[in-house]
Amino acid sequence: MTVRIGKMTFSDWVSLPFQDGWSDTFIFRINAHACIPPFEFGPLLKRMAAHTFSKRSSASLWVQVDAPGEWYAVEVIRSLKGLAVPFVVTRAGITPNYVDFSFPPPLLYSQSQPPPAVEDKQQSVSQEELRCLQALGRMVKGSEQEIASLAGLPVELTSNLLDMLKTKKLTVYKISPKIISDKSKPEQMDLFPLWHPRSKGLSIALRSWGVPTALDFKNRAEENLQQIGTPHRQVSRNWSEWLKSAWPHAEIWAGWSEVCLPEVSVLPDGLAWGRIQGFETLFWLEVGDEHKSRKQIEGITQKRLDEAWKFCQETGIRLVYAQLSMDWVHEAAKWACVELPNEVAVVMGSQKRFGELPIMEWGSVTRN
């Protein structure tokens, strides 16, 4: 039941009974399969919590994460460090204890009245249709194959879903102007039509992520949107499907392209998350690099590997680092992949051979 406090809305509200009183707790729900990386919710929740606390000084926040594995929920917790409102993050279906909060939440002498409920006036869509809208909400525009990969759906089903969403006037298939970073350059059009969310479709996606109408959610979008429609972006957006095809024994739970990681100075072309050989793992993708010199490739590969492994160590997750490029790029990059930790694997393949990767080995570099 969606509730309102001031200009903010939350998934629900509860007054939790503790030994010394009752909490005044607002609930925010996150689904790991909703096409958004875990750390992107932090800035949104901090703005929501600040407004809520200004209206209700007894407020606390309970973030419920529906996700397999452990990494996604841990990253949500990391993104909320410094939040001025007492908060707790749990897996879906688990009720927190008083000591689980980031710091003691204010308690009331009796159970307070819930905040006003908000009627949901959004157009109804199926869960699969919603997943397509969520994918488009992050991608801004994309092809059927790209949407299917991010949404975790079969391509044929995605094609049918997009047509149904088009009939409902929630998506549109068209050629649009390219997104450019330099506004002084003349406008150019995409080379081929792509799927876009209409305003109503985007609104449904935003509400499904728990974003109040009073706030934007700029963090949702990929970085480097000017690359949309290029072969480079097509590979990075299809990274999840590439992994599923190459390693059917692996579990790939979610994936995103062009992700800005917290406290990391490099940007992976693609990032997927899942389990392989029994270990929860991040699958880091880099595409191309043919425009760099051999020395530059060695240097940037060393930096990427160091940053990626440092990021993984924060949560104890393993790392598979993939370089999809030409053979001479692999030759240059391998010199940066020495003395690998036993929790890191490096694989090198061709960006032109979809769904093919060498067998990975922890602590080693393997090539096709």
Image (cartoon, helix red, strand yellow):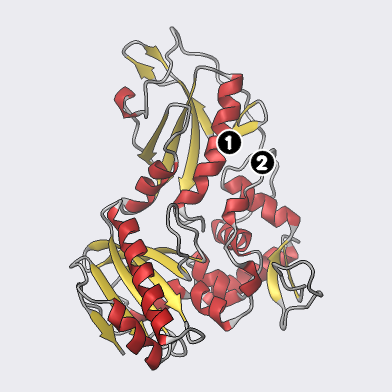
Query: Height in image: 73 above or below 355?
Result: above
The residue type indicated by label 2 comes to: Leu
Quadrant in the picture for residue 129: bottom right
Residue 283 locus on image (x, y percent): 36, 68
Quarter containing the N terminus:
top right
Q: Is residue 302 left or right of residue 106?
A: left
Residue at the top extreme, as displayed: 109
Residue at the right extreme, as displayed: 186
Of the image marks 2 and 1, the number of the one nearer the N terminus: 1
Quarter containing the C terminus:
bottom left
Residue 305 locus on image (x, y percent): 33, 69
Determine whether the residue tagged by mark 2 lies in a helix, strand or loop: loop
Residue 28 in view: yes
Query: Height in image: 175 above or below 60?
Result: below
Quadrant in the picture for residue 91: top left
Residue at the front extreme, as displayed: 295
Identify residue for label 2: 215
The residue type indicated by label 1 comes to: Arg
Q: Which mark is residue 47?
A: 1
Q: Is residue 247 left or right of residue 203?
A: left
Residue nearest the viewer, comparing 158 with 237: 237
